[in-house]
Amino acid sequence: MTTITQPRWAQTTTDLNGKTVLVVGGGGGVGEGVVRTLLASGATVVATGRNDERLKDFADRVHDSSLHVATLDGLGVELDDKAAALAAEFGPFDGIVVSIASWGEQGNKPLLTITDDEWKALVEDNLTAVFRVYRALTPTLAPSGILLQLNGLSADIPFPGNGVVALGAAAGKSLTRTLAAELSGTSLRVYEVILGVVRTRARQLAGVDNRGWIDGTEIGTHIAELVAGTSPLTGEVLHYFIDKATGPVTTPPQF
Ligand SMILES: NC(=O)c1ccc[n+]([C@@H]2O[C@H](COP(=O)([O-])OP(=O)(O)OC[C@H]3O[C@@H](n4cnc5c(N)ncnc54)[C@H](OP(=O)(O)O)[C@@H]3O)[C@@H](O)[C@H]2O)c1
């Protein structure tokens, strides 16, 4: 009989009991898988989104007493107050995962046809929001906490039809790596994790699925190991999780 060995990231064995992780965008497609794994690891999880109804649906679906949901808008004027309130109620956080992005309203559009308003909205949603979330929430980390951005491969490669989304991804990667360098003398750890295509609920509901794509829960396994400090990549800032079979690595894929 052949024994099929599961890769390490297929299922979490990490113990995060006593740890609290905030997942900004935790109610989103990728966030959901991450949240589920962190809960399965024993963590208390605070998942945020901008839309109250969507968050309630999400909480009902996940149905776990260790899950808390809260609205948090990275562009909101009340962001600093909300961050302080979350920290007072649940913090300090052992991990903060930033899993936010927006495709905007314009659909696929060549770069030179993007209007000023579309440009502004895309840059604000994909870059300014990330910066503001970092500024508001980094002070809420526990002394050995981790700040981790989930990002897409468009940070590294041209993305025809979605040039401003790609620009936000590339700039977000730069921002995260700079923050990692600036905080390198502290006990905080900062990570940039660049993902390949992820199996999400929204895609599955739309009938679009591929078992070869990464599952959000596998990303969660990697994050759980980083929070615990047990990942082989603990000392590396930049990670690529593109290929399900290979798992998280530090080298970018070759095109
Ligand atoms: N899906 C993929 O295949 C894939 C592949 C590679 C990388 N990624 C990366 O994974 C991350 C998450 O993507 P996703 O597919 O999960 O997106 P998603 O399903 O659209 O979820 C995004 C989440 O972020 C929240 N959000 C958006 N803008 C925000 C803002 N300004 N302030 C606060 N929260 C905000 C959303 O809240 P609302 O629900 O209230 O709008 C939602 O909870 C992104 O960085 C993306 O680049 C995804």
Image (cartoon, rainbow, N blue to C red):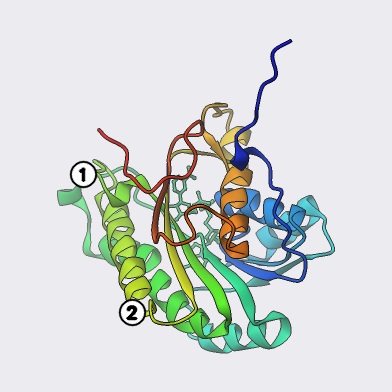
Residue type at mark 1 is Pro
Q: Is residue 124 visible?
A: yes
Element at label 1? loop
Q: Quadrant of residue 172?
A: bottom left
Residue located at (60% from left, 42% from top): 9
Q: Quadrant of residue 120?
A: bottom left
**Between 111 and 154, which is closer to the camera in this rendering?**
154
Label drawn at residue 217: none
Label drawn at residue 182: 2
In the rendered structure, the answer to whether residue 207 lies left or right of residue 136 reads right
Kindly report the distance in space between the C-alpha atoms of the residues bearing marks 2 and 1.
36 Å
Residue type at mark 2 is Glu
Residue 57: image location, x then y, percent: 74, 55
Sort mark 2 into few (<14), some (14-19) or many (20+) by Cα contacts within 10 Å.
few
Q: Residue furthest left?
A: 112
Q: Is residue 57 visible?
A: no
Residue 70: image location, x then y, percent: 67, 72
Which residue matches tag 1? Answer: 110
N-terminal label among 2 and 1: 1
Quarter that holds the C terminus: top left
The total number of labels drawn is: 2
The answer as to whether callout 1 falls within 8 Å of ligand 1 is no
In the rendered structure, the answer to whether residue 62 lies left or right of residue 70 reads right
CB under 8 Å between discs 2 and 1: no
Quarter that holds the N terminus: top right
Residue 188: image location, x then y, percent: 49, 77
